[in-house]
Amino acid sequence: MTDPAAPAVAIVLAAGLGTRMRSALPKALHPIAGRPMLRHLLAAVEAAFERTVVVVGPDMPALERAAAPHPVAVQRERLGTAHAALQAAPLLEGWQGDAAVLYADTPLIRPATLRRLRAARREADLALLAMRPADPGRYGRVIGDGAGGVARIVEWADATEAERAEGLCNAGVLCARAADLLRWLRAVRNDNAKGEYYLTDVVALARAEGRRCVAVEAPEAELRGINSRAELAAAEAAVQAALRAAALEAGATLVAPETVFLSHDTRLGADVTVGPNVVFGPGVTVEEGAEIRAFSHLEGCVVRRGAVVGPFARLRPGTVIEAGAHVGNFVELKAAVLGEGAKANHLAYLGDATIGAGANIGAGTITCNYDGVAKHRTEIGAGAFIGSDTALVAPVRVGARALVGAGSVITEDVPDDALAIARGRQAVKPGRGVGGRQGRG
């Protein structure tokens, strides 16, 4: 047996193309709650293992970036799961502890379950995760040895009718001493219905050496594999339900919980109120007492305490809504700071802008932040009033307590306490209205 304090490495198999997804995106990169499946699993692995190696397929640079900072091994030929796990062998030279094999398309495993797997391994030579799904379907079956252990795992395609009737199913995750695991992986053969090298054959090889194998059961919801868009949608629904429950438990009000979509890292403070049909992308923090009204979309932003956002507002990455500020309907902010108590109540675009405390942004105001080559910032001072339908051509600064007349196009800085009006002079032509033009050819 391994020293209980010995470290363990996780080998994460992520080389699958996911043909059933019918997607050019590698299967492990399909997101759940705003985070790729691979990153969900790595978060759990990092909490339970001392080291991680990720196995990817050839020409998968996006997957390699998602695996960082963990080292990557490449499976250049997809010859089966045992073959994939074996590609990590060069990165495990001299490793004296345990090694576990996991799948990137089984992303919902909890750290506590992985710790139970490691603990079970200390009492046996090989431990694996298993479940009893409501519909066993085409999962591999775990066949007991009659003494509380595991005799073998049989893939559905190779199982007899009696074996398919077994309810305990393999989840694909196993753990053994690294030296034993690598030896068994090298001994796996491909004489099966698919002609592949199955990781599950490691169990039979261990048993052939007289080794003890055990199964650790966990819920289906945690061990479910994701191989299709339908299974991805089911996993998303399960994760969203858990995130909503956690938000409610932490003191947020979700007016219509089933219509609110959270990201894996959404942070909602106590007494936050979220209206119906609100979507949170990654990287959102909403502080105590703030209100997010219906049909708003937030991503990569911070909403400070007591602020009000929406309805129908969009907060893009880099935005900060300071305490007590108001963002109204059809207002979009990007890389902008809306100061304490400031208001942009309707129909505005504020990009690359800093807006001082107590400023008021009129309807139809836009910051013209992009000149076709580079982005430029707009600064609006505390207490300033920007009249409706104003275009602020960045880079530009409007001073504190300044007033900009409605319909202006501001291209030059406006000093503190000044009035700026920049619009064409109105011309009135008597008799040239609709009535005056009647009868003309």
Image (cartoon, rainbow, N blue to C red):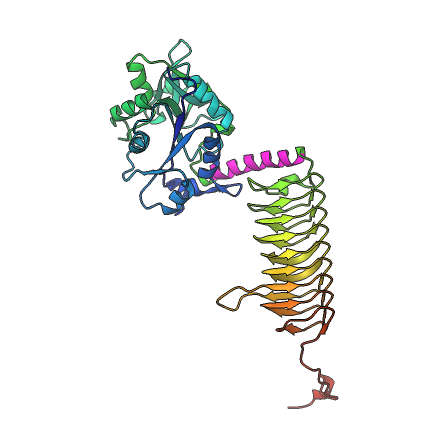
Residue 9 in the image: state x and y as whole percent: 39, 28
Residue 309 in the image: state x and y as whole percent: 68, 51
The segment highlighted magenta reads 230-248
Residue 66 is left or right of residue 352, and the answer is: left
Residue 180 in the image: state x and y as whole percent: 31, 21
Residue at the front extreme? Answer: 416
Quarter of the rendering containing residue 251: top right
The secondary structure that dominates the magenta segment is: helix
Q: Is residue 251 visible?
A: yes
Q: Is residue 167 visible?
A: no
Quarter of the rendering containing residue 164: top left
Total of numbered circles in the picture?
0
Quarter of the rendering containing residue 260: top right
Q: Residue at x 38, y 43 (%)?
A: 64
Which quadrant of the figure contains the C terminus?
A: bottom right
Residue 216 in the image: state x and y as whole percent: 45, 19
Q: Is residue 169 magenta?
A: no
Query: Which sits in the foreground, 142 or 16?
Result: 16
Residue 441 is left or right of residue 118, and the answer is: right
Q: Is residue 240 magenta?
A: yes
Which quadrant of the figure contains the N terminus?
A: top left
Query: Which sits in the foreground, 24 or 42?
Result: 42
Query: Which sits in the foreground, 281 or 340?
Result: 340
Query: Which sits in the foreground, 318 or 265?
Result: 318
Reply above or below: 95 against 251: above
Reply above or below: 120 against 340: above
